[in-house]
Amino acid sequence: GSEGNSKVRIKGSRFIGLASPAFEREESGKIVRAEEKKHHAAAHHCWGWRALEESETAFAYNDDGEPAGTAGAPILKAIEGEGLLGVVVVVTRYFGGVKLGTGPLARAYSEAAGKAIASAVKTEGMFGASYSLTLDYSALGRVNKLIESGPAVIISRNFEEKVGLKIAVATSRAEAFISSLTESTGGRIGIEPLGVRPVFQD
């Protein structure tokens, strides 16, 4: 699937990182549990998750028995440092018998998380500029056609009085794409930029 992996070894401890798209908290939980199963002999499965929506509550992390602040928080920082949204990073630690101390431990988790993220973005992800679009039903056909033919993916759809679409576009093509949307709808479209995030396409 669309994920990145990493391995870091320090004083006999092995840290195995996995970065995967997870738009919802529930989805991130499933990915964490799958890693726990896969590495059932490991000592710790620490993780950080950030939702697709930017808000105060849209993140979570867990130290899974490691000293507070040495695992989950550095993993989450690695995600935030890349400006990523809608992603979970799990770092599994096989204990090598030597205690690392909090500084080196936090660095190890941070490094394993950073490498997993870099590998995910390189292999599967494309960075996308994302937008929230609001349009009338009458314009939906034209907008859908543009999205299908353009370098864009739909992240979510919402049908109320108007149509709400969240889309992501390859960053390099975003400007041209947005102006073609405006043109095709005669300017009758609400376009709100949501920032850059990874878009994983299966």
Image (tube, helix red, strand yellow):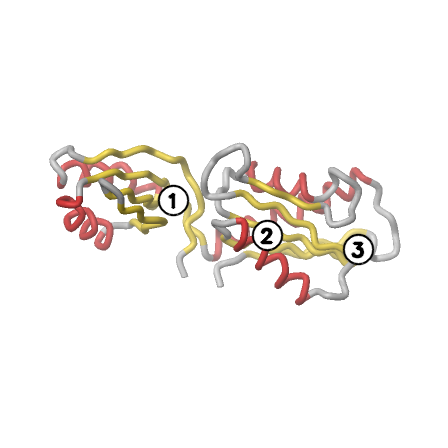
Reading the image, the residue beneath label 1 is 128
Disc 1 marks a residue whose amino acid type is Gly
Q: Position of residue 112 (x, y in %)?
A: 66, 50
Looking at the rendered structure, which numbered label has been put on residue 116? 2
Q: Residue at x 58, y 58 (%)?
A: 31
Looking at the rendered structure, which numbered label has been put on residue 91? none
Give the CA separation, mark 1 to mark 2: 19 Å
Lateral position of residue 172 relative to residue 148, left or right: right
Q: Residues within 10 Å of mark 3 (few under 14, many from 20)?
A: some
From this view, report whether residue 166 is shown above or below residue 18.
Answer: above
> 124 or 189: which is nearer to us?
189
Q: Residue at x 73, y 66 (%)?
A: 40
**Mark 1 or mark 2: whose residue is earlier in sequence:** 2
Q: Residue at x 31, y 46 (%)?
A: 158
Q: Residues within 10 Å of mark 2 (few under 14, many from 20)?
A: many
Disc 2 marks a residue whose amino acid type is Ala
> 130 or 110: which is nearer to us?
130
Looking at the rendered structure, which numbered label has been put on residue 13? 3
From this view, report whether residue 7 is shown above or below residue 48.
Answer: below
Lateral position of residue 24 relative to residue 112, left or right: left
Q: Residue at x 15, y 33 (%)?
A: 187
From this view, report whether residue 86 is shown above or below residue 92.
Answer: above
